[in-house]
Image (cartoon, rainbow, N blue to C red):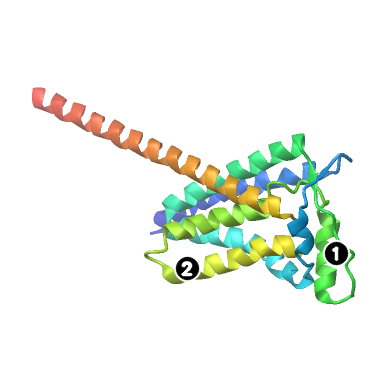
């Protein structure tokens, strides 16, 4: 029983790869002074709502909490999601290095908890490296995963999708991102998920065929004997 328990926790260690990948952002989170403003007329009509900083910050437990959950209940989707998250983030980092974008931030008025949380976010995250949005990218990947499982787990689909939608909207209402950032994040999420899923399916098919081939050779050898 002890060995089985240890083995069940082993895939969770791969989540550290996501943590390490995420740490790269702190290195490139610097303004070059040549960032491009990607806001549009639509962004001008979207109000700044400081209360949305709450779902924005809850993005962290949302992503890691779901990944831990899927590690135990759906190992296949766990690895596809992990590969998608890491690949998507690395692509974002490459884009940020060669094309830096920005979103103008509003003046935060008030001294309530929401205003202070927004100031905290602004102080730790430079107003650059916005497109694609990593918040949107990673959130939408988790929404794709839960969509794949919706037939068996409708409550899970409803709750994860609803809260994921709040997180995506929070990137706009906190003025951390623009509409183009959100759209780019969604498109990238779809692209990397499909690609990683295809790679895993191809790998699984190869392993099955390879195992079947070995079994056939073994049976032929036994027959000859």
Q: Is residue 40 above or below residue 57?
A: above
**Helix, strand or loop at disc 1?**
helix
Residue wearing tag 2? 156
Quadrant location of residue 72?
Answer: bottom left
Q: Earlier in the sequence, mark 2 or mark 1?
A: 1
Badge 1 local density, few (<14 within 10 Å), some, or many (20+)?
some
Q: Quadrant of the N terminus?
A: bottom left
Q: At which x and y percent is residue 43? A: 76, 58
Quote the CA–CA distance across marks 2 and 1. 33 Å
Residue 218 picture location, percent across and down:
19, 29
Looking at the image, can residue 83 be seen?
A: no
**Viewer-proximal residue, 59 or 19?**
59
Decide: is 118 above or below 20. below
Residue at the location (86% across, 39% down)?
A: 34
Instruction: Give the total number of marks visible in the rendering.
Output: 2
State the mark number for residue 119. Answer: 1
Place residue 164 in its image quadrant: bottom right
Q: Residues within 10 Å of mark 2 (few under 14, many from 20)?
A: some
Q: Residue at x 22, y 32 (%)?
A: 215
**Residue placed at 47% from the left, 60% from the top?**
146
Q: Position of residue 126 (x, y in %)?
A: 83, 51
In this rendering, position of residue 8 left or right of residue 90:
left
Say which of 80 and 9 sits in front: 80
Quarter the C terminus occupies:
top left
- Residue ranking furthest to the front: 41
Asked which secondary structure carries label 2, the reply is helix
Q: Percent position (x, y) of residue 142?
A: 54, 57
Q: Nearer the viewer, residue 17 or 83?
A: 83
Seen in the image, is 114 located left or right of residue 63?
A: right
Farthest residue toward the bottom?
A: 112
Residue 143 appears in the figure? yes
């Amino acid at each position: 029983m002890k060995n089985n328990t240890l083995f069940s926790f082993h895939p969770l260690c791969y989540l550290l790869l996501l943590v390490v990948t995420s740490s790269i952002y702190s290195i490139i989170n610097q303004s070059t002074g040549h960032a491009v403003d990607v806001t549009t007329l639509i962004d001008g009509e979207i109000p700044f709502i400081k209360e949305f900083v709450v779902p924005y910050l809850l993005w962290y437990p949302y992503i890691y909490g779901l990944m831990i959950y899927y590690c135990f209940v759906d190992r296949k989707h766990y690895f596809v999601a992990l590969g998608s998250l890491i690949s998507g983030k690395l692509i974002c980092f490459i884009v940020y290095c060669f094309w830096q974008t920005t979103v103008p931030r509003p003046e935060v008025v008030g001294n309530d908890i929401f205003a202070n949380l927004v100031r905290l976010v602004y102080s730790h995250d430079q107003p650059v490296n916005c497109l694609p949005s990593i918040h949107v990218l990673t959130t939408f990947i988790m929404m794709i995963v839960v969509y794949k499982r919706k037939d068996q787990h409708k409550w899970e689909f409803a709750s994860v999708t609803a809260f994921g939608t709040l997180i995506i909207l929070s990137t706009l209402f906190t003025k951390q991102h623009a509409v183009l950032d959100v759209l780019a994040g969604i498109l990238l999420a779809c692209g990397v998920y499909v690609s990683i899923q295809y790679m895993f399916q191809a790998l699984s098919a190869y392993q099955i065929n390879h195992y079947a081939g070995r079994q056939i050779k073994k049976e032929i050898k036994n027959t000859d004997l």
